[in-house]
Amino acid sequence: FGRDLIRNISIIAHIDHGKTTLVDRFLDITGTVEHRRMKDQFMDSMDIERERGITIKSKPVKLNYTARDGKTYEINIIDTPGHVDFNYEVSRSLAACEGAILLVDASQGVEAQTVGNTYLAIENDLELIPVLNKIDIPNANIEETLAEIVDLIGYKAEECLLASAKTGEGVVEILEAVIERIPPPSGDILAPLKALIFDAVYDKYRGVVVHVRVFEGSVRGGDRIMMMSSREIFEVIEVGYFLPQMVPTDSIDAGEVGYIIAVIKEVASAKIGDTITGATNSTPEALPGYRVAKPMVYAGMFPGMPEYYEELRKALDKFKLNDAALVFEPESSPALGFGFRVGFLGLLHMDVVRERLEREFEITCILTAPNVVYRVTMNDGTVREITNPASFPEPGEFAKVEEPFVELSIITPSDYMGNLIGFITTEKRGEFKAVENAGKNRVVMKFVTPLSEIMFDFFDRMKALSRGYASMDYDIIGYRESNLVKVTILVNKETVDSLSFIVHVDKEYAVAKKVVDKLSELIPQHQFQIPIQAKARGRIIARSDIKALRKDVLAKCYGGDVTRKMKLLEKQKEGKKRMREIGQVTIPQNAFLAILRIG
Ligand code: GDP
């Protein structure tokens, strides 16, 4: 293969718009030997994301396509994750390509995140091919969807292709357009190695498999390579291509996509966005765009029972081998004992970690409500990053508090504009910035809001207020000052530090009241009355009481069916793993997350 016979692309698409189906068609057309469907492969590795309807990255795939000009081209397709938590990874995957297919379901229209990812592609100088998919569906709105692409992305209608990934109509034209419109890679094969890491996956048997795009030079087995951010050196064991199964080869050269195996023990040593070069024959300058993944939300993670602390630590350590974005450090809470403060890229990332800890490591743990990272300037001018509400300073100790803000963009049918503007500006501390038309009867709106407001209890409300039609995307724009206060919760007159939260002063009373009410629903009745109180700035601002219980749990079936009694006890034992005794009160797991849904 000469360089001019290579094309490196990714596919930008909203969930369910047909990316997997399209790649399957490509595999069929090019006779790529792997007969298992892409979706089956997703199912193996990332069923959690799949169940939640979020596309997660699949392996890259290399196709050999014989085009109408009679030449056989190598097309590498690099996948991008479909969730804003992973935006940085998306940008690095795009940076590995010269072009992208922008796939839009013609019966759904352009969604906000697709626009966001398209801008990322344009920033990376990619050539785009807009494709309207699902044109076989009778109610496909081809005209309107084309108008949306023109308004939102700035492409002309004539530049868009029409296709059905399901029937195969128009799919060959997409491949032809890839060959014609997307430039081949450039880059000197004889220069020192310069390769971009766009993914790294941990394999139990082989260590870390690094997914790379080589920009200059080449890499082969036996080479000594260096990670430019850490200057760590590794010896290459094997290099190869994705067909999509891993197939070893002699070398991967400038312009190509493939994998490197080099006895790397954890993915943290192969950071996404980092540049790999030769250990001795090094390139002077790394590829642009690398940054350290920074956690955006933190939560406390405590073992279900204190004796499981070691197990939880081991599970987190193991998890970290495969997830460089996860950070954690030991934390001790007067209420919950020893555990960890864990940092995540976002709430989806948090859910994925928690579920995988449960499924793969059989660890049940108590997770406290997550919070963003606050920046507090103390009276003496020192600045602290607060990742735990419990360590938020008292009023009078600090000069100002800042929190992360985002630019939020929402695409919605115009009918729901009023609902959404009202919700975001009155309930979510949002500032309305602009609105523009996006095709017929649809608009794109821009707001500036605190990150915390859109992380908690936002997506479902937005969907409800727009009958499911609105879609959102956001970009973090930096820290801004906010008037925030800490609310502490007392259960049976004892402070439960792990239930503390930070809230804007305007919402202090309303949120505190909802939280104590919710907690009094979620905490079971005991033999005695339990007051639940919220305290802020030194005084009690809300209270709700749980009445005393009269009967014993087992009293109901005393003398009755023994197996039923056993089952009940068994269930209670299971449940206990997710409960904590605070003083004399038992608090169930869901109580710790109660404020998530109030916010
Ligand atoms: P992904 O989430 O973007 O990977 O989407 P999938 O490829 O899984 O497709 C989502 C759904 O749309 C599946 O039920 C597909 O069968 C269906 N689908 C994909 N492309 C087409 C198409 O061109 N026409 C029709 N009618 N359905 C399609």
Image (tube, helix red, strand yellow):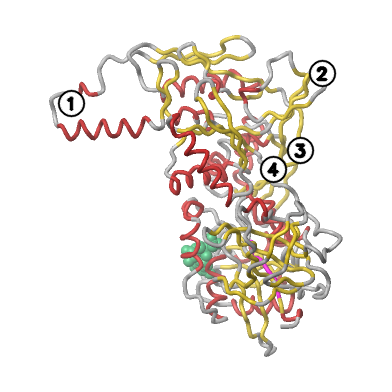
- Residue 271 is at least partly visible in this image: yes
* Magenta range: 7-12
Q: Amino acid at mark 2?
A: Asp
Q: CA distance from mark 4 to mark 3?
A: 13 Å
- Residue 137 is at least partly visible in this image: no
Q: CA distance from mark 4 to mark 1?
A: 53 Å
Mark 4 vs 2, N-terminal side: 4
Q: Secondary structure at mark 3?
A: strand
Which residue is at 54% across, 66% downward? 20
Of discs 3 and 2, which sits in the foreground? 2
Mark 3 vs 2, N-terminal side: 2
Q: CA distance from mark 3 to mark 2?
A: 23 Å
Which residue is at 60% across, 46% downward? 415
Q: CA distance from mark 4 to mark 2?
A: 27 Å
Q: Amino acid at mark 3?
A: Gly
Label placed on residue 234: none
Q: Residue furthest bottom?
A: 70
Check contact, mark 4 vs mark 1: CB within 8 A.
Answer: no
Residue of label 2: 380
Label placed on residue 557: 1
Of discs 4 and 3, which sits in the foreground? 4
Question: Crowding near pointer 1: few (<14 within 10 Å), some, many (20+)?
Answer: few
Q: Position of residue 334 (x, y in %)?
A: 53, 20
From the viewer's perspective, tell me whether residue 202 is left or right of residue 484.
left
Q: Which quadrant, please, contains the C terminus?
A: top right
Q: In front: 130, or 344? A: 344
Q: Position of residue 51 (x, y in %)?
A: 46, 53
Q: Position of residue 92 (x, y in %)?
A: 71, 58
Q: Secondary structure at mark 4?
A: loop
Q: Which quadrant, please, contains the N terminus?
A: bottom right
Q: CA distance from mark 1 to mark 2?
A: 63 Å
